[in-house]
Image (cartoon, helix red, strand yellow):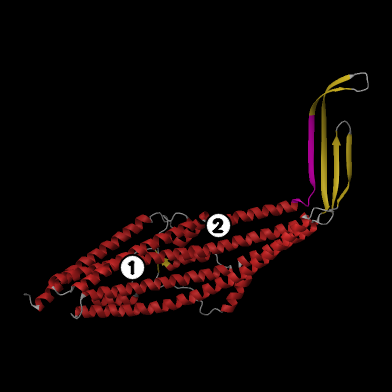
Amino acid sequence: MASSKQVVTCCTRITKQFISKLLQYLNCLKVLVAVFTSVAFSGLAQAGAFATLLEMAHSNDPTYLSAKVAVESAEARTNQAFGQLLPQVSASLNSKFNDRDYHVRDGNNRTAKDQYNSNSAELNLTQPIWKYSNIISLRQAKSTTSQAEQQLANTEQELLSKVVSTWLDYLGARDQTLFTQQQIAVSNFKLQVAQRGFELGSISKPELDELKAKFDQANAENVTAETDLNLKGALLEQIVGSVNRLKPVFMRDDAKLFNLSSENFDSVLARAESESHNILAAMYAYEAATAEVKKQYAGHQPTLDLVASYGKNSQAVGGFGLQLNVPIYSGGIQSAKVQEAIAQQEKARLDMEAAKRLAILTTKQAWYGWHSAYSKTLASEQAITAANSALLAAKVAVNSGLRSEVAVFEAKQQLSAAQRDNNRSRYDQVSNFIKLKSVIGVLTNEDIIALDTLFVDDYQTLEFKKSASLAKVNDYEK
């Protein structure tokens, strides 16, 4: 029977062999992922990811395109309302062939049969002098156009914010997928070592079964992560269309993010209530609804038109004068229209109040969301520092023969988890800051394009980009 020293020596040799194989496996995995990334997203334009996303969103998002068309429609209605105040001129021409056959009832039984052409021409002009409803219609149309313009501006603000948040969610899902792939590699390594140890009698069956369960769990988490990545990609496609042109990028370790710590929340909230495009659109909708009430009340008023006509049949005839119309009774139709307009006015008022409350809620969500993400960023940075220290300690212990190489891989996995969490919290900082600017209504295309400076597109390692402190660990190894 082998001595304990021989067993330890054998296990050490087997462990080193598997470490070598695992390193080869990780290098192959890194190459495969890099190749997959370059092939799957080879169509990316020279512009940065956010610039490309912005271009695609403006060209493909149906909600935004619909809002643009709505503005054109509202402008056309304004032109129609203005046209109702101008003279209305119409002309008509007639040419008829007549075939007449008739009998005269005078006792003589005379008959007559005629065939002839008749021609006529008529020119009519009507100039409204007093139609209050037409004046109100023009004011209403202008309010409706302003409403459509504000809705378009709000839609674009929401589109820019949605592009950023959806893309960053996609990157977060990508980071999680890479992390779970690492988990599989480490779990597989530990399982293989345990199986050899079980064969040598140094690992018990329950311990081996536990490692098998962890390996299966790692695979399940990877499937979940890949599913989430695919769903995040599907959400992105709803906004920008096909994502084949897009290449996932990586946030720089030295990225300088926007800081809201020194901003006053009350002033930000006040700006949201006064400058939000959604609130302004609701205000113009209320103006239009108020104008509709006045227009329907005007239906009870008399109207006065200047009318003129000239026609020629067998003889020239014409007329020129004023035409007064006084509504007397319409069966209650006009009164019902007034009631409907009043109800619509109240609805518009409530919609305006709802828009204000939504702006306040969205502002608070973005504000507190940023501060929460900022706190998580600070915590994750400390976690990275702790993970680097743990990795250094594990390497020292391995070199001293106090611990196995498994401890190093576990420390590296802990570091990767901290880096993943740090990326996620920084993504959330960016998303909430952009969302805050969006609800205030001051987000621009340039703000989105500038985000490209925070990211790089080179794929360095499955462990993400190493921090400066980790570089010191590598120096120690040399």
Name which quarter of the figure residue 95 lies in: top right
**Which percent across, then down, holds residue 40?**
36, 55
Residue that mark 2 sits on? 63
Q: Is residue 105 above or below residue 463?
A: above
Residue 458 visible in the shown view: no
Residue 163 visible in the shown view: yes
Residue 240 within the magenta-colored segment of the rendering: no
Q: Are marks 2 and 1 in contact (CB under 8 Å)?
A: no
Sooner in the amino-acid sequence: mark 2 or mark 1: 2
Q: Is residue 334 above or below residue 110?
A: below
**Which percent across, then down, holds residue 323?**
87, 48
User: Which disc number belongs to residue 179?
Assistant: 1
Q: Is most of the magenta stretch helix, strand or loop?
A: strand
Amino acid type of the residue tagged 1 in the rendering:
Phe
User: Which disc number belongs to residue 102?
Assistant: none
**Which percent across, then down, holds residue 60?**
51, 54
Tag 2's secondary structure? helix
Q: Which residues are magenta?
A: 83-95
**Which percent across, then down, holds residue 88?**
79, 46
Tag 1's secondary structure? helix
Q: Residue furthest left?
A: 1
